[in-house]
Image (cartoon, rainbow, N blue to C red):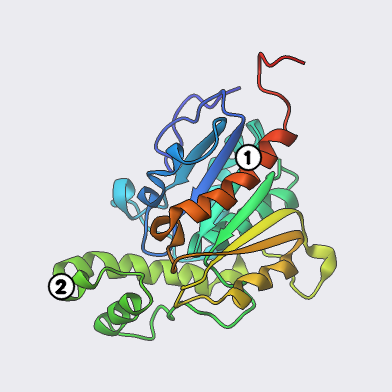
Amino acid sequence: MTTSAPVSCLGRTPRADARLRLFCFHHAGGGASFYASWAGRVPPGVEVLPVQLPGREARFREPRFSDAGEAVSALGRELAPLLDERPWAAYGHSMGALLAFALAAARLREGGRGPEAVFLGAYAAPHRTPTLPAPDRYGDAELARALVGFGGLDPRFLDRDDWLRALLPIVRDDLRICASHRRAGLPDPDDERTRLPVRVEAFAGTDDRLVDPAGVRAWGRYARDFRMACVPGGHFFPREAPVPFFDRFNGSLHRILAALDPPPGARS
């Protein structure tokens, strides 16, 4: 049965004929528009569903999350009917990687339909030393310069106090989500028995000034089937160097599609 009304974090009702739903979670300070071009880049049969957290873009009037456990619980409740309905996968970029992985872990823990795969981009495993700035360590000017320094903020923002006043409260709450990862219900990286029993693929940008490949590779302690790839580009490599990233990413999506039941109407 298809959900009859759009879910607020998606903005629309997903298609009933998609073979694979790809739920995409954005980075700290970002929004669902980060994935605006993805529908035209992934294989046919994959429906890209960017997840919009409250407090930004189309949901800017809604209260923001500032706790990872609260965010994952709310997303799980809202997306549950769609996750149970059809095969799905998740991609999360930077902060979104934490949310995507924690959502998959929660689904499996609660007996819901798990993902075909979880894809993580540009985020160090949570047990590593945090790479993102602490939410309350810096004043606004220092935080803005730190964000510009690793390529997370357009330098033009430094000359626009009005832009920074609108953006930095969002960034700080998102950084609080990252800092509260222990409340997200993640597996214990020191206990092999808790590792996620699904395929997890992680991506690191070769020129990322914030997250190094070793930090991304450490996600291998959270999953039984783990793969990692280094791709050209900085912290936002899907936007900076999309061709090599999507070459690798789409190969994985094609493998998932091939393993699913044949599409309706296909010859046996």
Closer to the camera: disc 1 or disc 2? 1
Estimate the x, y position of residue 171 in percent, counting from the top left: 36, 68
- Residue at the (42%, 66%) spot, across then down: 174
Name the residue type under label 2.
Asp
Q: In which quarter of the image is residue 220?
A: bottom right
Residue on which disc 1 sits: 88
Q: In which quarter of the image is residue 138?
A: bottom left
Is 230 in front, or is 127?
230
CA separation in Å, label 1 and label 2: 41 Å
| Mark closest to the chain's N terminus, 1 or 2 | 1
Estimate the x, y position of residue 214 in percent, counting from the top left: 63, 77
Estimate the x, y position of residue 75 in percent, counting from the top left: 53, 49
Q: In which quarter of the image is residue 234?
A: bottom left
Please tell me how crowded label 1 is: few (under 14), some (14-19), or many (20+) other residues with Cα within 10 Å: many
Does residue 97 sit above or below 57 in this rendering? below
- Residue at the (42%, 40%) spot, across then down: 8
Q: Which residue lies furthest to the right in this view?
A: 193
Q: In the image, 268: left or right of 38?
A: right
| Kind of element beneath mark 2 | helix
Q: In the image, 240: left or right of 122?
A: left
Is 217 in front, or is 222?
217
Estimate the x, y position of residue 22 in percent, counting from the top left: 55, 42
Quarter placement of the N terminus: top right
**What's the mark number on residue 161?**
2
Name the residue type under label 1.
Trp
Does residue 185 sit above or below 13 in this rendering? below
- Residue at the (46%, 37%) spot, across then down: 7
| Kind of element beneath mark 1 | strand
Please tell me how crowded label 2 is: few (under 14), some (14-19), or many (20+) other residues with Cα within 10 Å: few
